[in-house]
Image: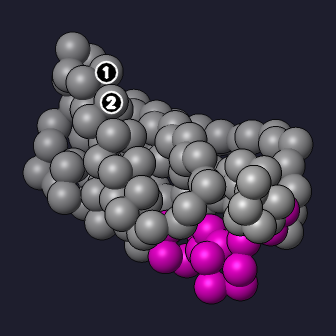
């Protein structure tokens, strides 16, 4: 066994950064959803593609031993309010999350990415 096997916390510069993750999520949402019109038949494909793109870009950050979970919700813009919440049981020293929203005249989208450090 090597010393790396016993590391229980990432180095300070190797932690999940909420601000950087939020930039990534916002960029993906703008790229995928600008000028898109809501259609219920397309939302499951869009959510899967958006989640996969976000997860791929988060992995490109090179954070070793992190698992990423991405949740994307897309709905029709009707002027109604929507609330989204989450509960997580994790280590606040190593784990975190980031969210971003996008909306236009036709759709709204909320995406959340969770970075969980694997001990």
Q: Which mark is residue 48?
A: 2
The image quadrant that residue 10 belongs to is: bottom right
Residue at the image position 62 percent from the left and 68 percent from the top: 16
Left or right of residue 109: residue 7: right
Left or right of residue 69: residue 23: left
Q: In the depicted view, which residue is nearer to us: 6 or 78?
A: 6
The residue pinned by badge 1 equals 44
Q: Is residue 107 above or below residue 18?
A: above
| Residue extending farthest front | 1
The image quadrant that residue 99 belongs to is: bottom right
- Reply yes or no: does residue 27 show up in magenta: no
Q: In the depicted view, which residue is nearer to us: 39 or 105?
A: 39
Q: Which region of the structure is painted magenta?
A: 8-21
Q: Is residue 81 visible?
A: no
Residue at the image position 46 percent from the left and 34 percent from the top: 73
SS at mark 2 in the image? helix
Circle 1 packing at 10 Å, graded few (<14), some (14-19), many (20+), is few
What percent of the width, then of the height, locates residue 92? 86, 63
What percent of the width, then of the height, locates residue 8? 84, 62
- The reply to whether the C-beta atoms of the residues labelled 2 and 1 are less than 8 Å apart is yes
SS at mark 1 in the image? helix
What percent of the width, then of the height, locates residue 65? 62, 55
Residue at the image position 56 percent from the left and 41 percent from the top: 69
Left or right of residue 14: residue 90: right
Residue at the image position 61 percent from the left and 76 percent from the top: 14
- Reply yes or no: does residue 20 show up in magenta: yes
């Amino acid at each position: 066994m090597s010393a790396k096997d016993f590391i229980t916390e990432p180095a300070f510069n190797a932690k999940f950064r909420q601000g950087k993750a939020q930039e990534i999520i916002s960029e993906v949402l703008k790229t995928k959803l600008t000028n898109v019109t809501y259609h219920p038949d397309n939302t499951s494909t869009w959510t899967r593609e958006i989640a996969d793109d976000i997860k791929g870009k988060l992995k490109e950050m090179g954070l070793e031993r992190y698992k990423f979970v991405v949740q994307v919700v897309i709905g029709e813009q009707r002027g109604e309010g929507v609330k989204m919440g989450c509960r997580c049981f994790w280590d606040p020293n190593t784990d975190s999350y980031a969210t971003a929203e996008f909306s236009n005249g036709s759709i709204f989208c909320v995406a959340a990415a969770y970075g969980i450090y694997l001990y």
